[in-house]
Image (cartoon, rainbow, N blue to C red):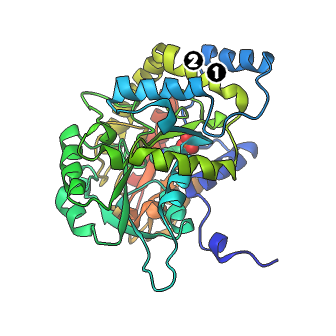
Amino acid sequence: MRLSHRVNSIKPSSTLEVTARINALKAQGVDVIGFGAGEPDFDTPENIKQAAINALLAGKTRYTAVPGEVNARAAIARKLRDDNGINCNAEDIVITVGGKHAIYLALQCLLDPPAHGRPAQQVILPTPAWVSYEPMIVLAGGEVVQVPGAIENDFKITPEQLEQAITPHTAAIIINSPSNPCGTMYSPDDLRALAAVVEQHPHVTIITDEIYERLIYGDAEHLSLGSIDSIAPRVITINGLSKAYAMTGWRVGYACAPGDGGSVARAMSKLQGQMTSNITSFCYAAIEEALTNGEDSLQQMRKAFSMRADLIYDRVAAMPDIVCPRPTGAFYVFPDISAYFGRNSPGGAMIDSAVDFATALLDEANVAVVPGEDFGQCARDHVRLSFACSEQHIEEGCRRIDRWLRAFR
Ligand code: PLP
């Protein structure tokens, strides 16, 4: 059967592929250490589960309003006002099937494919960037403009780089802080400086993916771009429950788009109404519970991630010829492994790319990492390790990698 150019033009998610490969090896009984997972290893807190169970038993089993039940939207708007300083109300919120679909909807609502002599609309993507942004931009007919962040600057782009990348065809920029895959984040001052650039270009919308905002470590501080008054009407804030509350399987995300009289939120809701309708009906109660009574559990998980961040950073930074910024948010480290390119692995494989490196590491040392290629051109020298796993797992996995690297020829 003929498949559309649209679907043929995108690649499957490499992070989900690595996870599938790890699971297949484990099923064969291989003692594999997986650093691939992009999800917390914790279980969803009991009170949040119970809220959904109660809602289910109470008969919350029917279609709901497309952008979500009003109480859950109000709880999200309250959280965004109180915690993030975003001036918004329940009607500015669209609850979506994961943060992923919120980004997809936003891009579909902002972009048109090039047609009738009209050039492509560009989306500025600071890289390394999460693997799904590029395919989602392409599916919406947009053109991806990669702007590389330097490792010496914790992978952040500078205001000068942003200024240079903006053209009359720029429709949007995607900012993701804390970052997947980098594990680093922009400081409030960095973000204010980027906002000052965007302020000068009124045709540019900011999509800010803040899905990891609650998982930050040390003295790192998060600022929501949607709280900066001068650009707030042009900011679409993306967030969700997946990462902060260990709820990846629930598929609960949201977008907040208070600008332009609510036109973007209404457009996203209209599109969702023709796609997924609403999220699972008994999850709304879980949203309210997570946002009102989830803080203690969140802090326990955050503390565990914080200790793991220190541990994995210490181990990885001590590996021979590896350069790695310290993780300050999310649950990833993204070391530069290019010193091993052009060399033979202990098992005799010639390593010329991050994919070669990750493949040989898995084959020879039973450790799974995600190769950098799909995170952007500037990410080809890197692999991603997730530390959403136990400390023993981190110790053992890093011990294996270290031993494997020291046996390179
Ligand atoms: N944004 C980033 C940067 C992510 O890493 C992820 C998940 O891996 C998402 C968004 C989407 O999360 P979800 O769809 O589970 O809410």
Q: Position of residue 71 (x, y in %)?
A: 58, 23
What's the CA distance linking mark 1 and mark 2? 6 Å
Q: Position of residue 33 (x, y in %)?
A: 57, 41
* Position above or below: 407 against 348: above
| Residue lying at 51% horizontally and 81% vertically, measured from the top left | 115
Name the mark on residue 285: 1
Residue pushed farthest right?
A: 1
* Nearer to us in this view, 359 or 153: 153
Q: Amino acid at mark 2?
A: Glu
Give the quarter of the figure containing the C terminus: bottom left
* Position above or below: 300 against 219: above
* Nearer to us in this view, 110 or 22: 110
The picture quadrant where one finds residue 330 is top left
Give the quarter of the figure containing the N terminus: bottom right
| Residue lying at 63% horizontally and 38% vertically, measured from the top left | 251
* Position above or below: 292 against 232: above
Q: Position of residue 339 (x, y in %)?
A: 32, 62
Q: Secondary structure at mark 1?
A: helix
Q: Amino acid at mark 1?
A: Ala
Residue 196 as seen in the image, left or right of residue 110: left
Q: Are marks 1 and 2 in contact (CB under 8 Å)?
A: yes
Q: Residues within 10 Å of mark 1 (few under 14, many from 20)?
A: many
The picture quadrant where one finds residue 96 is top right
Q: Secondary structure at mark 2?
A: helix
Q: Residues within 10 Å of mark 2 (few under 14, many from 20)?
A: many
Name the mark on residue 289: 2
The picture quadrant where one finds residue 256 is top left
* Nearer to us in this view, 40 or 364: 40
Q: Is residue 110 visible?
A: yes
